[in-house]
Image (spheres, rainbow, N blue to C red):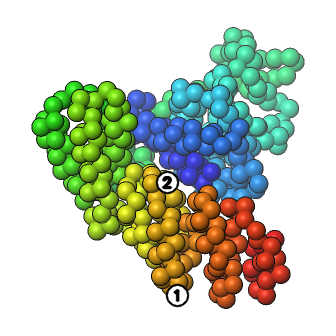
Amino acid sequence: MKELTALIEKAYRAYRIYPRGHEIPKHFLRQVWEKLKELFASRAEISFYIERNRILDEEGNIILEGEENEENFSWFLYKGGIKGVVITPQISLYELKDFFEAIGEVSDLDQDKYALLVALNKQNFEGISYEIAPEFIEDENVFIPETFEEFKKLKEKEPKSEPIEVDEKPVAKIEIPIIIESREVFKISYEEEQLLQEEIEKEREQNKLDKLLVYLIEILKESDLPNFNRIIDAIEELLLIEIKNKNLKRILSVFKNLKQLAASAGQLVWATEKIKRIEFLFRKISDSKLISGILEEDKLNNKEIQEFIAHLKPPVAIDILEIAAKTGKHARRNALLKGISKIEGLDINKITQYLKSNIERKDLLIAGIELLGMLSDESSTRFLESLKNMEDEDIRIALVKALFSLKGDISPFINDTSSKVRLTAY
């Protein structure tokens, strides 16, 4: 949720700064849309609540906080009378765009406090609903249309010069503000804009590469073996360049297309030889010295790191486990371990033997325990249960978590001498 609200705030600022049709707002819109799709895979709706300069989730946790000015998305909603927002899977990309564009129309809430409500009520949203703060419309002399139909009815009856009445309630005159596009009032630096433009350009290049790979895969299916090998050699060179540049998106695009090619073995000419060549390429890339720069780069996306590792070959697993053991950041460590757990053909016995040989190394053993807790395998459970008598408190806490995730027996830890271990077990 924090990632979502951070992306929403970036999109909000971009739509208020740039004119309609500009690439930068579109870029942030796509990011918000992708994050929404990801979240809806595990929840029925997304809701958050506005508290002055803060946004809270359903449980009251702060997920966005900023200063009390209109640069802050939560303050803008609060000042505009919005108390809460609910987004459901019914939302479409076009509706999301309309939402941000409606917000972008509102130039100054100091001049017209109802401008945001009016702008939103123009839209006929299906996947977005919002709650108006009761105290915001306590003034009985003001009527705020609550539905799109009410708004249309109001607009049909509204004279140009004076207020009218709807259902015997006075209606305040509605003024649609004119947005003056002036670079002097834009609150974004030249450097920030350049970085955004570079990111957009990278995305365009990524789209071009994706299209090229689709065509290339079709050519590879039908080509003879010498031409196939020449093209794979060229792809290998591309991969090595992108690994050096730490461009995970491009690397993953190539990996996915090669995997799809290997999966379509029945459609291939020289199928056996071609699949062997693809497998050899993946083994060559699965070199810890080659890929360590990517795995240790803090700025890279953890989900992409996990997906990258899952494509690698089993022999590199122990080297990645060593990197995970030395990684202080929990999210990156978890991504490394989850990636290992998804490697096809992972040799669990080799990992447990390696842990036994290095049993005195606490950091490695704890990382290994965490990894084995992700693997539903009898040998993993047996190895973990063999460690129950370890004296170190941190190791026993890791054991409780791992065995619990495997539905193993954690009863020996219920009466542990350490209160921390007992608390973890409970």
- Residue 360 shows which numbered tag? 1
Q: Residues within 10 Å of mark 1 (few under 14, many from 20)?
A: few
Specify which label sits upstream in the sequence, 2 or 1: 2
Q: Residue furthest top?
A: 156
Question: In what quadrant of the picture does the C terminus appear?
Answer: bottom right
- In the rendering, at what x and y percent does residue 312 appear? 37, 55
Q: Residue at x 72, y 65 (%)?
A: 408
Q: Is residue 338 above or below residue 206?
A: below
Q: Quadrant of residue 181?
A: top left
Residue drawn at x 78%, y 77% is 412
Q: Amino acid at mark 1?
A: Glu
Q: Residues within 10 Å of mark 2 (few under 14, many from 20)?
A: some
Q: 332 or 414, which is in the foreground?
A: 414
Q: Nearer the viewer, residue 129 or 87?
A: 87
Between the residue at mark 2 and the residue at mark 1, the CA separation in whole angstroms equals: 27 Å
Q: Residue 317, relative to residue 272: is it above or below?
A: below
Q: Foreground residue, 281 or 323? A: 281
Q: Position of residue 93 (x, y in %)?
A: 53, 29
Q: Is residue 64 visible?
A: no
**Is 199 in front, or is 408?**
408
Q: Quadrant of residue 67?
A: bottom right
Query: In the figure, is residue 395 to the left or right of 7?
Result: right
Residue 348, label in figure: none
| SS type, badge 1 | loop
The residue carrying mark 2 is 342
| Secondary element at image label 2 | loop
